[in-house]
Structure formats: C-alpha cells, structure tokens
Amino acid sequence: MSEKILFVDDDANLLAACKRLLHGKFPIETAAGGQDALKLITGNASFAVIVADMRMPEMDGIQFLSKVKQIAPDTVRIMLTGNADMSTAVNAVNEGQIFRFLSKPCPVDVMVKSVEAGLRQYRLVTAERQLLEQTLNGSIKVMTEILSLVRPMCFGRASRASRHVRQLAEKLSLRNVWQFEVAAMLSQIGCVTLPGDILEKVYVGQELSAEEQEMFASHPDIASRLLANIPRLEGIASMVAGQQTSTTSTQSESFVSSESDEVIGGQLLKVCIDFDKFLTSGMTPRLAIESFRQHPEIYNPKIVETFASLTVGSSDNKIMRLSVRQLRVKMVIGQDVYSKNNRLLISRGHEVTEAALALLRRWAETSGVREPIHVIAPACEHEIPAPTVLQTA
C-alpha cells in the first residue's frame, strides 16, 4: 500500500501502542519527534496522513505540522494532545491547517475513524490535483500548438523565454517553478490577434508607428483575459499581463521575500523576453545584461544579477544539420526554418512538437522546405539517421 500513515510523538510507549493496536489496518511508520519526522519527509518519504502529538520537546506539534504543510501540502494533518484547551485547538487549526483535533487518551475506534477520514480527504485532494494537472496540461498544449502554427516567430520567443525563466526561478529558489515557466510559454498567445505585418516589424527590429505600437502593447492584456477564463490560471494570467511592467526600487528591495508570485512572474518575463528581443536584434548577451543594469527602474536588479550569473548553453552542445525526415519531437531548432518560397515556418529556439513536425512534413511535400535544418543536439532523445555535425555550440 502506498498510502502510509506517520505517527509522531516523543513517547516511545505511545508509538509502540499505535503500531500494535493499528497493525493490519494501515501501513504505519513512526518518528520520535518533529525533527526525525521532517528528515523522513524531506528524504522523499510520502505520507497520506500524519498524526502528531502537541507536546514535544524542541518542536511542538503546531510548529511541526506547519512545516509539513509547506513541505507536503497534500498530506492530511491530525493533532493529538492531552491538553485539549481552546487556544491550542485554535492555534493548531490556524497555523497548521489541521484536519482533525483529537484528545488523549484517544479510543482506538475514534483514531481509526479519524485516520480513515484523513485517507478519504487525501484521495480527494490528490485526485482533484491530478485531474487539474491533466486539464491544465491539455489546455496549455493546445494553446501553444496553435501559437506555433499561427505565429511561429512568437512561439519561438515564448519557447526561448520559458527556458530562461525556468533557470531563473530555480536559481532564485522560487516555489512552483512550473507556473513561471507556463507563464512564459503563454506570454505571446495574445499575438495571434495581431496583424502579421506588425509582428514582422517587431521581430526584425523595424520602428512601429504610434498606432502599431499601441496595438502591439495590447497583446499581454489580450492574453491575460484569455487565460483568466481557465480555472486555476488566474495567477499565470496576472503574470502575463505584467510582462511589460517596469519595476521600482521598492519592489527590487523587497524581492523575493514579500512580493506576490504574480509580481515576481511579471518581472521574470520582462527580463527574459526583452533579453530575447535584444539578441534577435543583434545585441550580444553581455551588452543586453549591461543595458538591464543601466535601467534598474525598469528591470529588477536582483533578477538581472541572477540572470547574469547563469550559464546559458553548454560546451557539450552540438549543432547538427538534419532533413525534415530526420527531425523528431522535442528537438530544438537552432536557426529559423523557411519554406522554399521564403515563408518562415519555425523560428530559432522552437522545441519541435507533433503539430510543428506535421506542418514541416506537409510543407516539404508541397512547396518545399529549405534544408538542412539546424538542430541543437542535447534536446534530441531519439536515434537520428546519419546526422552531420557542424560545430560545438
């Protein structure tokens, strides 16, 4: 059984009694105090329900279960104590978000019913999360596939930005890195509503008229409104909306400790998307970073310095020249791919998807695709027939 129960108490006799009385009903593990229990949890041990005593040395039950909530939020938490006073109960519920509050001595049948109720709650929470993840993943995949087909240049920028955002979020030790990465992947979705000629100007660095600039500047808000209609993507929608928002000195000083995920996400997008803009306009990475540093009122200095410390790319990367027939899903395009009649099909940095692969094969059979196609080798997970290695990246 994978749904394990953890009992935490400094009383060895009580732990032994729990094992003896509940043997055969649940898979049980025990820990002699909060510190030992946290070592189990942080050591990749997974528990469906944790029952913890209130009165323990070094770390009481409220402190312990509050930490459990941060480390393993899906785990159902139950408090067991011989001091069933009102203030203890209130603190336990408020700080540790306790599922049940049991008093010592606790009858075996009451304990069994409480643990069973905790298991039902755990199954409900995990089932809802799995369904949500599948639904979100499906929705995100559909939107990014559409973007890759309709606006390949925009998809390329989003794809490159998402990799930078992921690196930054991990380096900054942010929680829920996935949401920042998804915000980057969906940051350009509003561009599907803009005229192609405006986007062409933007991506080749041509100056826009005031009217065109206003139209282009509206794409984050358009994307945000679209994403806000999807349940649980409200926070990501706010990040996308804030991708063109400048920072302030106050925000910079308080980052990461007090800013919301939405604000941090918008600032991450601002740096990573503008970095891509600078590079596609011909600026070197070093000059792009220096430009950021010169404008702390626009770019969060903490994010900029963290970004500057990251090593983008690897000396082990190899660039290969492949035909359309040799391409595989999850490869990363190294240079823009054009049809033989000069239409941009996939932009540099694009991770090849099923839809993109189908598009390229269709063009190869009709109008033709300029080959060979440059691909970055480490992203390739399949055997590739006779590739030609160009150089080490």
Image (cartoon, helix red, strand yellow):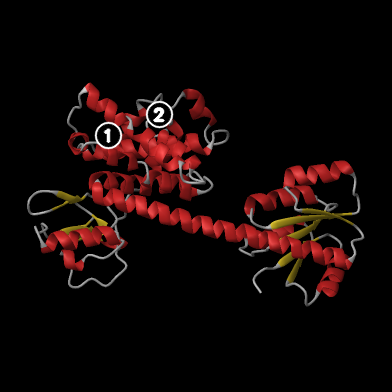
Q: Residue furthest bottom?
A: 24
Question: Above or below — where is 67 with respect to 193?
Answer: below
Q: Closer to the camera, 194 or 42?
A: 194
Is residue 305 toward the left or the right of residue 351 in the image? right
Give the secondary structure at mark 1.
Answer: helix
Total tally of numbered discs in the picture: 2
Residue 123 at x, y = what percent? Answer: 64, 63
Is residue 315 toward the left or the right of residue 184 in the image? left
Give the secondary structure at mark 2.
Answer: loop
Is residue 158 toward the left or the right of residue 248 in the image? left
Q: Quadrant of residue 41?
A: bottom right
Q: Quadrant of the N terminus?
A: bottom right
Residue for point 26% across, 62% down: 377
As measured in the structure, the alpha-carbon distance from the residue carrying label 1 to the one carrying label 2 is 21 Å
Query: Which label belongs to residue 313?
Result: none
Question: Above or below — where is 291 with respect to 128?
Answer: above
Residue 153 at x, y = what percent? Answer: 23, 45
| Residue 133 appears in view | yes
Q: Quadrant of the C terminus?
A: bottom left
Identity, as a three-letter code, of the amino acid under mark 1: Leu
Residue 188 at x, y = what percent? Answer: 33, 41
Q: Quadrant of residue 339?
A: bottom left
Identity, as a three-letter code, of the amino acid under mark 2: Thr
Q: Residues within 10 Å of mark 2 (few under 14, many from 20)?
A: some
Q: Which residue is mark 2?
A: 245
Q: Residues within 10 Å of mark 1 (few under 14, many from 20)?
A: few
Looking at marks 1 and 2 on the same chain, the residue that comes earlier in the sequence is marked by 2
Query: Which label belongs to residue 287?
Result: 1
Residue 249 at x, y = what percent? Answer: 47, 24
Q: Residue furthest left?
A: 341
